[in-house]
Image (cartoon, helix red, strand yellow):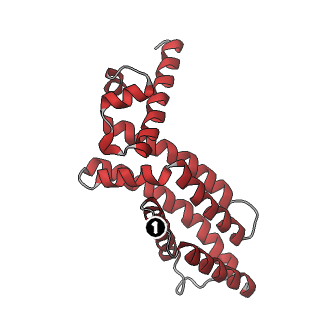
């Protein structure tokens, strides 16, 4: 394929992925059709299947692209030479900014889509695994920093706890529920500070 054709393809693919992100946030997967996606991207509807094979594939690639950027950011943040509590506070700030950017809604939209589509569910599970890997790396370091006994504080259990409460907070926030969230985060921060003092 000629370089100009490659450039055009790349631009068009990015335009479709950008459009998919916007529409997943604005109307959800149920409101997206091939024609609506193409109109949002300013491209021919036939190019959706030409480039991606299916509408679901566009939505999944949009989630995967978004995730890749956030995972890189999160990994770099957790690898910074700072006390874990400072990295944790930054992670909680990212939770807020990611909500504003629409990432949790996109992820949850595709989780819901995957409940009845095994091929979608498998791809969404890979996204979950990427986040789990980032947190596992960070929490192994934190456990050593705080001198946590593996039997009392298994890293896998801590990772699952944080992943489920993060998604729970995001789901409730998207539903307009904020009760108890500040209190939960304050309690966790107080616990981390007590561990810092103990360490």
Residue 97 appears at what percent x and percent y? Answer: 60, 54
Please tell me whether residue 2 is drawn above or below residue 38 in the rendered image. above
Q: Position of residue 163 (x, y in %)?
A: 48, 67
Q: Residue 89 falls in which quadrant of the image?
A: bottom right
Q: How many marks?
A: 1
Front in this rendered view, residue 71 or 115: 115
Query: At which x and y percent is residue 126?
Result: 41, 53
Left or right: residue 96 compared with residue 111: right
Q: Which residue is mark 1?
A: 177
Q: In the orientation shown, which residue stands out farthest toward the left? A: 116
Residue at 65 percent across and 70 percent down: it is 141
Q: Please tell me which residue is depicted at 48% across the width and 34% down the height of the picture.
A: 18
Indicate the secondary structure of the residue bearing disc 1: loop
Please tell me whether residue 59 is drawn above or below residue 180 in the rendered image: above
92 sits to left or right of 6: right
Asked whether 97 or 166 is in front, the reply is 97
Q: Quadrant of residue 112?
A: bottom left
Height in image: 98 above or below 23? Answer: below
Q: Residue at x 44, y 67 (%)?
A: 168
**Residue closer to the observer: 156 or 87:** 87
- Name the residue at 48% across, 67% down: 169
In the image, residue 41 sits, relative to residue 148, either above or below, namely above
Residue situated furthest front in the rendering: 176
Which corner quadrant holds the C terminus? Answer: bottom right
Neighbor class of circle 1 (other Cα within 10 Å; few <14, some 14-19, many 20+) is few
């Amino acid at each position: 394929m000629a370089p100009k054709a490659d450039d055009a393809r790349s631009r068009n693919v990015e335009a479709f992925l950008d459009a998919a992100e916007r529409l997943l946030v604005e109307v959800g997967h149920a409101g997206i059709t091939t024609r609506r996606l193409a109109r949002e991207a300013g491209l021919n509807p036939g190019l959706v299947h030409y480039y991606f094979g299916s509408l679901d594939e566009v939505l999944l690639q949009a989630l995967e692209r978004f995730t890749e950027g956030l995972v890189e950011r999160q990994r770099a943040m957790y690898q910074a030479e700072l006390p874990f509590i400072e990295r944790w506070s930054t992670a909680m700030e990212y939770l807020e900014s990611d909500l504003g950017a629409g990432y949790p809604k996109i992820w949850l939209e595709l989780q819901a889509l995957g409940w009845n589509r095994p091929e979608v569910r498998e791809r969404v599970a890979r996204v979950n695994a990427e986040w789990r890997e980032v947190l596992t790396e960070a929490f192994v370091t934190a456990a050593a920093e705080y001198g946590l006994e593996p039997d009392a504080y298994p890293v896998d259990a801590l990772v699952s706890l944080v992943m489920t409460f993060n998604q729970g907070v995001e789901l409730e926030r998207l539903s307009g529920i904020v009760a108890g969230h500040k209190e939960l985060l304050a309690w966790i921060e107080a616990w981390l500070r007590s561990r810092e003092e103990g360490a």
